[in-house]
Amino acid sequence: MGVAAHYLEIEWDSPGFARRIEVSTYPIQIVTARDGTMHAEVSIFRNFAPWVGLRLSGQLASVEPATVDAEGKRHPWLPVHDEHGDIWWIPATGWSKPSSRHLSEMHRSFGTFSVELGPSRNLVIDAVANELDRAHAQEYLDDFRDELVWLAIGKPTGALGEVGSDYS
């Protein structure tokens, strides 16, 4: 198949460079459908080893994975080398200077992610919350609190809203 998926714990040195990578003992199961599309299910809100990492081999060894968004735009994954010289590809969406780490939208987002593995292979990743407790649910909602307030008071965004009353 040429694809191995694992959860990774990454200690960052600088943007794009890991100081240490710890690979989960058990791989993330990948199933191939009849049409050749690969499917995997990952758990979000993992406290330990939150990163989903892909290690490519064989015919896919030279491929740069990319998440394809709803508009068809490609978002290349970041290659990170471990201490054994293996390359792990991760879906990094930015660098946080205050916390000195890469950010991962997939770590905290429900839904389906389409990952292009070259011109003819795709991996569909379903991000689910298997163990979402109240604290994690609150943490998830807190991420959107300011955005909802700005939407309500009219900050220019992709959506428009109006607040009013029939009695005013």
Image (tube, rainbow, N blue to C red):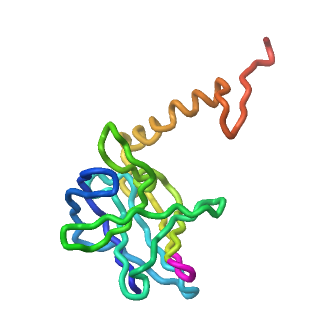
Position of 17 with respect to 115 (left or right) is left
Taking the magenta stretch, the answer to whether it contains residue 120 is yes
> Which residues, given as a range, are shown in magenta?
118-122
Q: What residue is at 32 percent from the left and 54 percent from the top?
A: 46
Vertical position of residue 10 compared to residue 119: above or below: above
Q: What residue is at 37 percent from the left and 76 percent from the top?
A: 29
Picture quadrant where residue 100 is located? top left
Residue 51 placement (x, y as % from top left): 34, 59
Q: What residue is at 30 percent from the left and 40 percent from the top?
A: 99
Q: What residue is at 43 percent from the left and 82 percent from the top?
A: 60
Q: How many marks?
A: 0
Give the main secondary structure, helix, strand or loop, of the magenta stretch. loop
Nearer to us in this view, 150 or 101: 101
Residue 138 placement (x, y as % from top left): 41, 38
Single out the residue that lies furthest toward the top: 168
Residue 39 placement (x, y as % from top left): 48, 75
